[in-house]
Image (spheres, coloured by chain):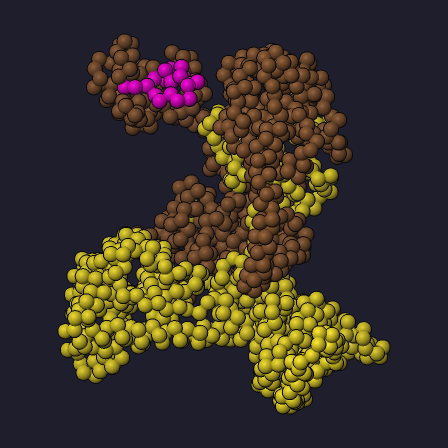
């Protein structure tokens, strides 16, 4: 590719200036200046050093303490029974870096191919073996293939008009892509298939970004003078900005729809998972045994005024349940399933006042209720309550106000709280004030057991089932409506499907809709249409939105695939 | 989602069964009950001690505040005619109380403050928190509620109908507050004389109404401004005093309130003791005190101090950590039954059971002790319980004496090191304490350099330090220090002698200088100067310097004999809590790192050979969620679910490959699909991904790093 570029440049008499040269050009100036000011600079540096030395001894002390701190932490991390592999924070919390779309498939095939012995990742890139990899990788290769064509046609403005910043980004050294280009040269013939061809069209017509990133693969002119260290640093920076530069995403366009897979609903999913044996059951059992030996310690610490929070991978539902049945049988306790989608702090407080304290009556606000509870508990010191909260960090309970109330509840001396958290950012819920109210003792209870209960309510990601749910409700509602009403809805649905490729589709404006409905003899006045729409709206079948120009737009808040399914089904019925 | 479980009333447990929990695990040892009682009594002692310390530290501040409150209103009431006073009367007297950055510790201070005020100044105190006051209406409601309630509390026997007036029915406004105040003060006037005398003698004729704002920074400015403006209209009728609890700096008042509002306040500044000093006092009085047998090991102390310095500056949290240490120690160490006052401990040692004697024999420090004994004694120690008990008593006493000496010598050493330039051994006594606990302090570089520096101290400093040391040693309870004190006193007298001699020396030097001033030629001048220089270089040490060396060497010898690290002592396990890892895991946990480890390296938890990581990457037999996680690490901001699923099934199929027949492949596929869905929704629950609307069937990645 570099060759190609070179030829083009010659013809057009546009010179390709390597980045390093440009950089030098820019940097030179200040460089001279620096030399001139060098004496001055060293002077000031000296002064600074002196100042630093004079900085109050406190600071030196602080630095010393910091060293101690780091040392102490390191020692502790290693000292802890080997359960802690010493992972530093830098590894866990880092920046976004650019990723190639095909890497996941590569890793998968690599993992698949190494069922025991490790195979060096380098030598395994052979088309016969990667036949099974998803086509995202093939798409990538294809892009590599067509890239020269693309480049030729666009070359002129490519070289001359891209601003410096962009060019620099393009020329950022990316050894990965470089090696990939060779790879594609050797394998692309076999990889090409019809499906790929189809996608070339879309790529060529619309997407500009793939071209850009592919351009990044042009090998940068190597400048031996470039310092390694600096390069590393800049490449880190470049990578960061590259990853954040484009809002476009480079993933394949395949959807689950095309996969022709049977939709799974909650029940079948549950059944299927039952069939799949739980891996490493013995080891998991052993882990649980370890945790269960802590029960008496938990009870002790709860009684001494601490509250207990459990963290770690794996559902802690079973563990807490076991704790409940083994230790709390003889005392009053409250179990809160935080993962329940409709749980509120109010309901927790209500069950305390109504069922534990046997109080009938309502409260104006949760704060009043809390005050009442704390008064009751302070009055009667024999009143004890154990509160178990599964998933204290769930959607419904993670709000600031609910956490405040729960923290205050838990700070009562005769209320003993034991809770579990799962979300990685759960500790961010608590500020110093809440932490001191909660008075936590942290316990790591990694169980590796599946989150059965916790995820059973979460339908957002199980795209498969959420669609079926919406679809069935849609058909049910529509079946109860008149023929005309169904027609109206169908019109709107069809219009929306026609516009599904338009990302900024605002909806169908009321006037247009009325026009269309009239033409189809579905309504005779806009009043009837409005009445009909009100009915839809009541069933949450449509949503209205006012545009910037004040016009009312109508939208069906259901994803396109479900809508398509619905229309197909309707056609079958008719 | 909430379920209440109530046991049948018969079975309800007796509340006094905490000790049972203590026993449940260590069923082998019968001392659990005793241990628990010891633990509780020790903790209660320490708790009351810390509270006492806090109270003592705050007395100064509270006295100042009380006198401020007295002043603020009595002045104006007496001379209302004066012009300045009339000007002033529109201003609300305000105390700005700087309490340090840890807001949670303010609670205790403010609570004791309001107690003090209640006793001395006024029964009408309201404490407002920002979270209760989102608007001025809530603030007034809260304020009136507290004021009226507290009034009822003070003389609760009063007319019943007053109690009936619920705060909800009174319109919450300043006028009603003023009315209430008038009625209340009038009522106390017209009351039965005996009662009146009692209350008025304490609170004066018209006690001020004190409103405390806890953590003023967190209030919304609008609410504060409104409240101040409104109440400034009523200062005549309602003697209001504000107290702002401030966490950062007094400047914050002016940044929160515009000039027009802050000019309505007459602010006086009060500064509470800094939390660092508070901590030092606690360490000094609790951790280093001889009356508490329980001690912290080096690492544990370091962790507690680090949490304090780097995380929260909260003394309360420090004490909480200390409490946890005590509980852990008594829970985990069966021999902690001996961790009590010496007399009692000896008694208990005498009645130890056979199992406990075995426990003693198992202690590493005791084993070392046995090995150092003669062979016959070794046999006796290992076989006869009675001898073990005897030796234990003796060793416990040794340990006790060691402590007393340790603390005194540590303080002496601290006198020296805390005044050296750059503080090689730390400025605070806690640092010195940690250094001494860690290992033999005299082998460290820092100690070496601090000795060097000590050898360069000037005389006046040295003398004052020696005097301080004498004071410390005299006041200490250790009995071995008579000689030491004598020696130090001797040093002091020698220094005094030196002073007399110094005059003479000075004369000599002056005379030599005089010689120089005589008229002479250049050659001679040069020669004499050279001689002078020569003599100065090779000059023998002066007497002072010799003495200084002696003093430093003596201190050094003291350190070597008394500041032996505790874990070199036999039976130190009984008194010292040293399991730092437990403490760290419970107080300073890292949930995300635990997740990271579990996902990246399941072998850490599931000890199965198949999971053993080979060459950095995890094996493909790892639990589903680990594989899915690992795959998602290779993706950019968005992840295509289909690709992900396919990659996942590639991996899983490879594992099950040989078993899967073509016939049942469809079903296998479904199962894999289901497993994938489960793993993905688990990742969503953990917060690694979230559903995205940007593209169909895509999820967005939320974390970076962790490869």
Query: Residue A68: where, in percent of width, then height?
Result: 62, 60
Q: Quadrant of the N terminus of chain B?
A: top left
Is residue A327 in sight in this rendering? no
Q: Identify the chain drawn in brown.
A: A
Number of numbered discs visible in the structure rendering: 0
Query: Which chain wears yellow?
Result: B
Quarter of the rendering containing residue A231: top right
Residue B367's image quarter? Answer: bottom right
Quarter occupied by the C terminus of chain B: top right
Query: Which of the 4 quarters of the picture holds residue B628?
Result: top right
Q: Nearer the viewer, residue A218 or B524?
A: B524
Query: What residue is shown at x 66% (from left), y 25% (from top)?
Result: A221
List x then y, in percent, for residue B219. 33, 55
Q: Nearer the viewer, residue B510 or B107?
A: B510
Q: Is residue B164 above or below residue A291?
A: below
Place of residue B414 in the rendered image (x, y in percent of width and height, measured from the top left): 60, 75
Q: Nearer the viewer, residue B150 or B446?
A: B446
Instruction: Give the residue at the far right of this rendering.
Output: B375
Say if the magenta span includes residue A554. no
Question: Can residue A451 be seen here?
Answer: yes
Question: In the figure, A126 relative to A373: above or below?
Answer: above
Q: For the point 27% across and 75% down, which residue is it?
A: B71
Q: Is residue B215 left or right of residue B375?
A: left
Identify which residue is drawn at 71% across, 74% down. Answer: B522
Is residue A414 left or right of A138 when viewed as pictured?
left
User: Can you give x and y, in whole percent of width and height, for residue A388 in the image?
Assistant: 47, 52
Boundaries of the magenta span:
A492-510
- In terms of depth relative to the viewer, which is nearer, B678 or A219? A219
Q: Does the segment drawn in magenta span residue A495?
A: yes
Which residue: 30% across, 56% down? B257
């Amino acid at each position: 590719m570099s060759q190609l570029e070179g030829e083009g440049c010659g013809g057009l008499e546009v010179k390709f200036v390597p980045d390093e040269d440009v950089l030098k050009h820019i940097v030179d100036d200040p460089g001279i200046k620096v030399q001139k000011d060098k004496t001055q600079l060293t002077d000031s540096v000296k002064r600074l050093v002196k100042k630093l030395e004079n900085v109050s001894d406190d600071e030196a002390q602080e630095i010393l303490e910091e060293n101690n701190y780091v040392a102490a932490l390191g020692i502790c991390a290693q000292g802890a029974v080997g359960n802690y592999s010493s992972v530093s924070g830098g590894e866990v919390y880092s920046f976004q870096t650019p990723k190639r779309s095909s890497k996941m498939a590569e890793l998968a095939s690599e993992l698949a191919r190494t069922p025991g012995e490790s195979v060096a990742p380098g030598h395994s890139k052979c088309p016969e073996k990667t036949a099974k990899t998803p086509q995202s990788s093939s798409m990538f290769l294809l892009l590599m293939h067509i890239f020269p064509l693309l480049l030729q046609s666009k070359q002129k403005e490519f070289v001359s008009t891209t601003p410096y910043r962009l060019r620099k980004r393009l020329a950022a050294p990316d050894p990965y892509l470089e090696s990939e280009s060779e790879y594609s040269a050797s394998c692309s013939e076999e990889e090409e298939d019809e499906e790929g061809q189809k996608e070339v069209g879309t790529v060529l017509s619309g997407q500009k970004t793939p071209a850009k990133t592919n351009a990044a693969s042009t090998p940068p002119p190597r400048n031996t003078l470039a310092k390694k260290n600096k390069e590393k640093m800049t490449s880190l920076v470049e990578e960061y900005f590259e990853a954040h530069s484009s809002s476009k995403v480079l993933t394949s366009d395949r959807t689950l729809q095309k996969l022709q897979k049977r939709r799974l609903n909650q029940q079948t999913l549950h059944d299927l998972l039952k069939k799949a044996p739980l891996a490493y059951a013995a080891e998991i059992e052993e882990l649980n045994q370890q945790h269960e030996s802590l029960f008496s310690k938990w009870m002790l610490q709860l009684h001494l005024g601490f509250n207990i929070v459990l963290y770690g991978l794996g559902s802690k539902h079973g563990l807490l349940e076991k704790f409940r049945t083994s230790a709390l049988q003889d005392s009053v306790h409250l179990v809160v399933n935080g993962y329940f989608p409709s749980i509120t702090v109010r309901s927790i407080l209500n069950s305390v006042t109504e069922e534990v304290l046997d109080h009938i009556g309502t409260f104006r606000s949760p704060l009043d209720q809390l005050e009442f509870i704390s008064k009751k508990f302070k009055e009667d010191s024999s009143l004890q309550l154990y509160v178990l909260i599964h998933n204290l960090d769930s959607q419904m309970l993670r709000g600031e106000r609910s956490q405040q109330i729960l923290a205050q509840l838990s700070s009562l001396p005769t209320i003993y709280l034991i809770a579990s958290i799962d979300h990685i950012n759960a500790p961010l819920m608590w500020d110093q004030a809440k932490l001191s109210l909660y008075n936590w003792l942290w316990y790591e209870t990694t169980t590796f057991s599946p989150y059965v209960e916790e995820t059973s309510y979460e339908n957002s990601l199980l795209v498969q089932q959420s669609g079926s749910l919406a679809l069935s409700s849609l058909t049910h509602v529509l079946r109860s409506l008149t023929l005309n009403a169904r027609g109206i809805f169908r019109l709107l649905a069809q219009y929306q499907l026609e516009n599904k490729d338009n990302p900024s589709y605002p909806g169908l404006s009321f006037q247009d809709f009325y026009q269309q409905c009239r033409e189809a003899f579905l309504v005779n006045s806009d009043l009837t249409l409005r009445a009909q729409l009100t009915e839809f709206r009541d069933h949450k079948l449509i949503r209205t939105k006012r545009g910037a120009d004040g016009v009312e737009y109508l939208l069906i808040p259901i994803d396109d695939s479900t809508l398509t399914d619905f229309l197909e089904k309707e056609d079958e019925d008719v | 989602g909430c379920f209440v479980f109530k046991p049948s009333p018969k079975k309800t447990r007796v509340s006094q069964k905490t000790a049972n929990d203590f026993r449940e695990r260590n069923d082998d040892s019968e001392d659990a009950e005793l241990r628990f009682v010891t633990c509780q009594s020790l903790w209660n002692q320490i708790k009351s001690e810390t509270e006492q310390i806090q109270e003592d530290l705050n007395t100064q501040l509270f006295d100042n505040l009380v006198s401020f409150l007295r002043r603020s209103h009595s002045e104006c009431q007496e001379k209302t005619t004066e012009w300045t006073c009339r000007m002033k009367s529109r201003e609300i007297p305000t105390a700005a109380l700087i309490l340090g950055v840890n807001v949670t510790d303010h609670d205790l201070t403010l609570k004791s403050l309001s107690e003090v005020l209640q006793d001395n100044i006024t029964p009408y105190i309201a404490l407002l928190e920002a979270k209760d006051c989102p608007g001025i209406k809530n603030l007034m409601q809260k304020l009136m509620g507290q004021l009226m309630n507290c009034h009822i509390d003070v003389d609760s026997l009063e007319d019943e109908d007053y109690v009936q007036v619920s705060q909800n029915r009174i319109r919450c406004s300043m006028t009603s507050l003023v009315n209430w105040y008038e009625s209340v003060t009038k009522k106390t006037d017209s009351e039965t004389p005996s009662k009146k005398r009692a209350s008025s003698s304490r609170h004066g004729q018209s006690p001020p109404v004190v409103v405390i704002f806890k953590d003023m920074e967190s209030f919304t400015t609008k609410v504060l401004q409104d409240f101040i403006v409104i109440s400034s209209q009523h200062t005549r009728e309602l003697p209001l005093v504000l107290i702002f609890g401030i966490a950062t700096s007094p400047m914050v008042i002016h940044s929160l309130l515009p000039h027009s509002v802050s000019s309505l306040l007459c602010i006086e500044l009060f500064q509470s003791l800094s939390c660092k000093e508070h901590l030092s006092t606690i360490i000094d009085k609790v951790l280093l005190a001889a009356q508490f047998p329980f001690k912290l090991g080096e690492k544990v102390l370091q962790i507690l101090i680090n949490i304090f310095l780097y995380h929260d500056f909260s003394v309360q949290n420090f004490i909480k950590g200390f409490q946890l240490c005590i509980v852990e120690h008594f829970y985990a160490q069966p021999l902690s039954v001996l961790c009590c006052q010496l007399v009692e401990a000896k008694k208990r040692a005498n009645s130890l059971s056979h199992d406990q004697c075995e426990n003693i024999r198992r202690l590493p420090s005791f084993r070392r002790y046995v090995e150092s004994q003669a062979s016959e004694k070794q046999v006796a120690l290992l076989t006869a319980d009675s001898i073990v008990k005897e030796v234990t008593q003796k060793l416990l006493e040794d340990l006790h004496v060691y402590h007393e000496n340790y603390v005194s010598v540590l303080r002496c050493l601290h006198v020296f090191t805390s005044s050296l330039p750059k503080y090689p051994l730390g400025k605070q006594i806690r640092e010195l304490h940690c250094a001494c606990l860690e290992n033999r302090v005299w082998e460290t570089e820092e100690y070496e350099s601090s000795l060097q520096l000590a050898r360069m101290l000037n005389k006046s400093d040295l003398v004052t330090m020696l005097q301080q040391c004498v004071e410390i040693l005299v006041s200490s309870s250790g009995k071995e220090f008579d000689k030491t004190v004598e020696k130090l006193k001797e040093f002091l007298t020698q220094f005094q002698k030196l002073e007399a001699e110094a005059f003479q020396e000075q004369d000599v030097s002056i005379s030599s200088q005089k010689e120089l001033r005589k008229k002479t030629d250049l050659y001679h001048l040069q020669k004499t100067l050279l001689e002078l220089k020569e003599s100065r270089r090779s000059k023998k040490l002066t007497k002072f310097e010799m003495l200084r060396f002696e003093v430093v060497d003596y201190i050094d010898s003291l350190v070597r004999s008394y500041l032996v690290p505790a874990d070199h002592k036999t039976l130190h396990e009984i008194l010292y809590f040293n399991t730092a890892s437990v403490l760290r895991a419970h107080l300073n946990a890292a949930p995300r790192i635990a997740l990271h480890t579990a996902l990246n390296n399941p072998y850490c938890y599931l000890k199965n050979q198949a999971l053993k990581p080979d060459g950095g990457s995890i094996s493909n037999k790892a639990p589903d969620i680990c594989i899915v996680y690992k795959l998602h690490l290779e993706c950019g901001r968005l992840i295509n679910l289909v690709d992900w699923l396919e990659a996942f099934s590639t991996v899983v199929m490879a594992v099950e490959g040989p078993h899967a027949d073509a016939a049942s492949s469809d079903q296998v596929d479904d199962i894999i699909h289901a497993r994938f869905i489960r793993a993905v929704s688990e990742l969503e629950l953990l917060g690694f991904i979230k559903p995205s609307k940007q593209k169909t069937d895509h999820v967005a990645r939320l974390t970076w790093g962790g490869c």
